[in-house]
Image (cartoon, rainbow, N blue to C red):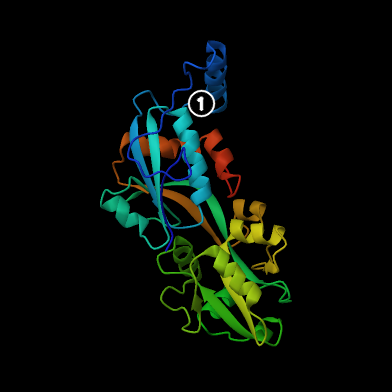
């Protein structure tokens, strides 16, 4: 189990006290302090009012941690009286934490009728296989058939004469919810699948699974593209003859994608609303776009 409770301004922080944010100290020349303040005002314009202050807890369990941390640090710089705690646990259910008041925002890939959803970007869902797997591409229906157990051999998809080892993700991960929903296979995943949580372990398992088995999994496209560009022995399969790339996810041509959502209570506290607004602003979308696909309206 991986669990993080960190102040966004520091890598790991468990103290309930907000970090100090005074940019002008007695040891700094006054001119330098003014330069720093002016730079922050220009680069990270405050999207909230002076009334935005206090603490905010954001909960999640997926691959979005790095993006949320960066957004939180930027939000704190833009709102010096606000501070953000990030509660990240791969075994948690972020929506429940919001509903019970333990967090004000949950990072998910699907909506909940009891909560308010704000979309801040897109993420593709990549179909990851070993680099040696010469399957040319798959259709969305074939992906559903593989993970529901209807197709058991790669040869049926024009690939090698090996058995398919599907790698599933834990039930509480939002990438699984989006994957099952889009393919219409909720509750129908094959019992032959191997369930693995951490993305790093998923990629290692795909690389380490050799004939007579060849593994396949679904993964955040950002993570899959990073593995491919780093020279890991994996590849991402085109789906419905569309390459899994940022432009095709952004315009909707790639058929497997999930929204990046911030969920809050229907009447969110001002700080939660201010953070969601910041995430959709130009500076926030620039941060989202470092890993994920920003909104097309930006």
Q: Position of residue 290 (x, y in %)?
A: 61, 45
Does residue 251 show up? Answer: no
In this rendering, the answer to whether 217 lies above or below 221 is: below
Q: Position of residue 60 (x, y in %)?
A: 41, 54
The residue sitting at 52% across, 84% down in the picture is: 149
Q: Residue furthest front?
A: 27
Front one among 75 and 20: 20
In this rendering, the answer to whether 46 lies above or below 118 is: above
The residue sitting at 56% across, 69% down in the picture is: 202
Quadrant for the N terminus in the image: bottom left
Q: Is residue 276 left or right of residue 236?
A: left
Front one among 47 and 21: 21
In this rendering, the answer to whether 266 lies above or below 170 is: above
The residue sitting at 48% across, 30% down in the picture is: 77
Quadrant for the C terminus in the image: top right
Q: Position of residue 162 (x, y in %)?
A: 67, 86
| Residue 286 sits in quarter | top right
Q: Is residue 67 left or right of residue 102?
A: right
SS category of the residue bearing label 1: loop
Q: Position of residue 265 (x, y in %)?
A: 30, 46
| Residue 245 sits in quarter | bottom right
Does residue 118 show up? Answer: yes
- For disc 1, the neighbor class at 10 Å (few under 14, some 14 to 19, many from 20) is some
Q: Residue furthest left?
A: 100
Residue under numbered circle 1: 45
Q: Residue furthest top?
A: 30
């Amino acid at each position: 189990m991986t669990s993080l409770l960190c102040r966004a301004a520091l890598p790991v922080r468990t103290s309930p006290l907000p970090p100090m944010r005074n940019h002008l100290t007695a040891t700094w020349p006054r001119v330098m302090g003014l330069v720093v303040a002016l730079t922050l005002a220009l680069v990270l314009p405050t999207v909230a009012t002076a009334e935005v202050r206090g603490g905010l807890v954001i909960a999640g369990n997926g691959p979005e941690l790095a993006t949320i941390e960066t957004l939180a640090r930027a939000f704190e710089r833009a709102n010096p009286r606000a501070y953000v705690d990030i509660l990240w646990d791969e075994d948690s259910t972020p929506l429940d934490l919001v509903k019970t008041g333990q967090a004000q925002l949950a990072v998910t890939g699907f909506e909940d009728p009891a909560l308010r959803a704000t979309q801040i970007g897109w993420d593709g869902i990549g179909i990851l296989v070993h680099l040696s797997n010469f399957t040319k591409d798959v259709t969305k229906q074939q992906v559903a058939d593989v993970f529901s157990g209807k197709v058991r051999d790669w040869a049926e998809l024009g690939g090698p004469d090996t058995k398919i080892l599907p790698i599933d993700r834990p039930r509480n991960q939002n990438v699984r919810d989006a994957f099952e929903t889009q393919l219409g296979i909720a509750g129908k995943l094959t019992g032959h699948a191997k369930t693995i949580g951490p993305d790093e372990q998923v990629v290692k398992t795909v690389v380490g699974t050799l004939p007579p088995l060849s593994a396949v999994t679904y993964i955040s496209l950002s993570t899959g593209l990073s593995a491919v560009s780093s020279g890991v022995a994996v590849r991402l399969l085109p789906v419905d003859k569309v390459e899994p790339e940022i432009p095709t996810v952004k315009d909707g041509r790639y058929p497997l994608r999930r929204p990046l959502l911030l969920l809050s209570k229907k009447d969110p506290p001002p700080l939660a609303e201010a953070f969601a607004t910041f995430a959709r602003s130009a500076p926030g979308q620039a941060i989202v776009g470092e890993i994920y696909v920003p909104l097309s309206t930006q």
